[in-house]
Image (cartoon, grey):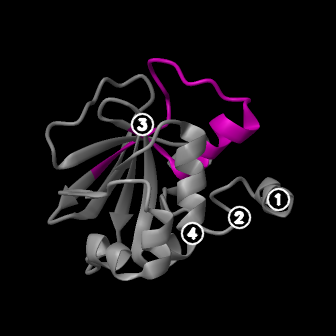
């Protein structure tokens, strides 16, 4: 499984992550790769991916537009959907998903989000596009894709999770 960290416009994310001793410590067991869309890290499980995103929470808020989790080759989920799948266990992902977005990327930054109509077969047309599965709220309300404080983890459940950790 891969995690894709999307930089905010104007941020050299790979350089920022390697410049900080704290983030280098969190990433010491991983090999971040700079890609045309952001910084990608391979992890073994969704739980490990969510834990790493949590460890890098300060960097996510400060330097990143969002965090995406690869759920199938070339298909990513938003942080909120990944959190609901893993912790909520009420959602089971299958071969298709009604709430999809296409992120168009240019020069390493997301420049546009496009909603895909439920039932539509629209797929990415090249490396400059990322298919993102999201929650219904993110789909209808516009996805910020940012793993913010409690919003990205599912509201009050996130606060409970933080206290238990």
Q: What count of labels does the image hold? A: 4
Reading the image, the residue beneath label 3 is 1
User: Residue 156 — which label?
Assistant: 1
Based on the picture, tell me whether residue 81 belongs to the magenta stretch. Answer: yes
Question: Relative to 125, does residue 92 appear above or below in the rendering?
Answer: above
Q: Are marks 4 and 2 in contact (CB under 8 Å)?
A: no
Disc 2 packing (10 Å; few <14; some 14–19; many ≥20): some
User: Residue 57 — which label?
Assistant: 4
Whichever of callouts 2 and 3 sits on the residue coming sooner in the sequence is 3
Whichever of callouts 4 and 2 sits on the residue coming sooner in the sequence is 4
Reading the image, the residue beneath label 2 is 150
Magenta span? 76-103
- SS of the residue at dot 4? helix
On the image, the x and y values in percent for residue 100 come to: 43, 38
Q: CA distance from mark 4 to mark 2?
A: 11 Å
Rendering quarter of residue 69: top left
Q: CA distance from mark 2 to mark 3?
A: 24 Å
Residue 16 appears anywhere in the view:
yes
On the image, the x and y values in percent for residue 125 come to: 15, 36
Question: 152 and 98: which one is in front?
Answer: 152
Q: CA distance from mark 4 to mark 1?
A: 17 Å
Question: Relative to 100, does residue 141 appear above or below in the rendering?
Answer: below
Q: Are marks 1 and 3 in contact (CB under 8 Å)?
A: no
């Amino acid at each position: 499984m891969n995690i894709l960290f999307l930089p905010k416009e104007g941020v050299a994310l790979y350089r920022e992550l390697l410049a900080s001793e704290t983030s280098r410590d969190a990433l010491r067991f991983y090999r971040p790769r700079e890609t045309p869309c952001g910084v990608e890290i391979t992890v073994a499980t969704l739980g490990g991916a969510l834990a790493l995103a949590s460890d890098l929470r300060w960097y996510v808020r400060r330097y990143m537009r969002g965090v995406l989790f690869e759920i199938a080759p070339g298909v990513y989920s938003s942080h909120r959907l990944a959190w609901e799948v893993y912790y909520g266990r009420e959602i089971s992902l299958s071969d298709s998903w009604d709430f999809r977005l296409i992120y168009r990327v240019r020069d390493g930054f997301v420049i546009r989000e496009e909603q895909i109509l439920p039932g539509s077969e629209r797929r990415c047309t090249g490396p400059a596009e990322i298919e993102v599965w999201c929650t219904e709220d993110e789909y209808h309300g516009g996805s910020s894709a940012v793993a913010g404080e409690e919003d990205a983890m599912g509201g009050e459940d996130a606060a409970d999770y933080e206290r238990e950790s």
